[in-house]
Image (cartoon, rainbow, N blue to C red):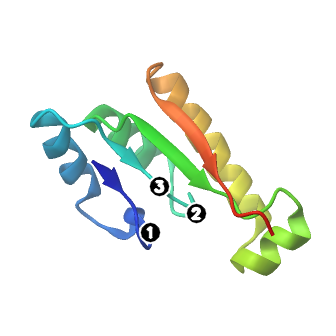
Amino acid sequence: MRFSGGEPTLRRDLVTLTAHAKKIGLQTAMVSNGLRLTRQLGEALVDAGLGAMPLSIDSFDRETYEYVRQSPYDKMLAAVEVARHMRNHQRRFWIGVNCVVT
């Protein structure tokens, strides 16, 4: 089960959906820009069974990122750190990067 489209972290029931998918035997992943990701949410998702999370990162160049995403570059860096924390919380958790070459 891949949670994507728009931004899955906008769903209040994302942890519940993840736990249900895991309970019925599905592997779970979430594609996110990470901007709403917190350590607390990350831990809850991993504990619920989230197995993978490709982060959508528009650029590692600050100016390009902020122009394309219209969001502070530092928020993206914070999301990367939360993803790393999620990986440390659950060693079998996979992190990836989605990007569009611009």
Residue that badge 1 annotates: 7
Disc marking residue 31: 3
Q: Is residue 92 above or below residue 14?
A: above
Q: Percent from the top left, x then y, of residue 79?
A: 62, 51
Q: Earlier in the sequence, mark 3 or mark 1?
A: 1
Identify the residue at horizontal 80%, vertical 74% (top origin).
66
Under circle 3, the secondary element is loop
Judge left or right: residue 53 versus residue 14.
right
Tags 3 and 2 in contact by the CB under 8 Å rule? no
Under circle 1, the secondary element is loop
Identify the residue at horizontal 51%, vertical 55% (top origin).
37
Q: Residues within 10 Å of mark 2 (few under 14, many from 20)?
A: many
User: Marks 3 and 1, how far apart in space?
Assistant: 8 Å
Instruction: State the image quarter where residue 48 is shown.
Output: top left
Judge left or right: residue 37 versus residue 77.
left
Amino acid on which the number 1 mark rests in the picture: Glu
Identify the residue at horizontal 34%, vertical 38% (top origin).
50
Tags 2 and 1 in contact by the CB under 8 Å rule? yes
Q: Nearer the viewer, residue 44 or 97?
A: 97
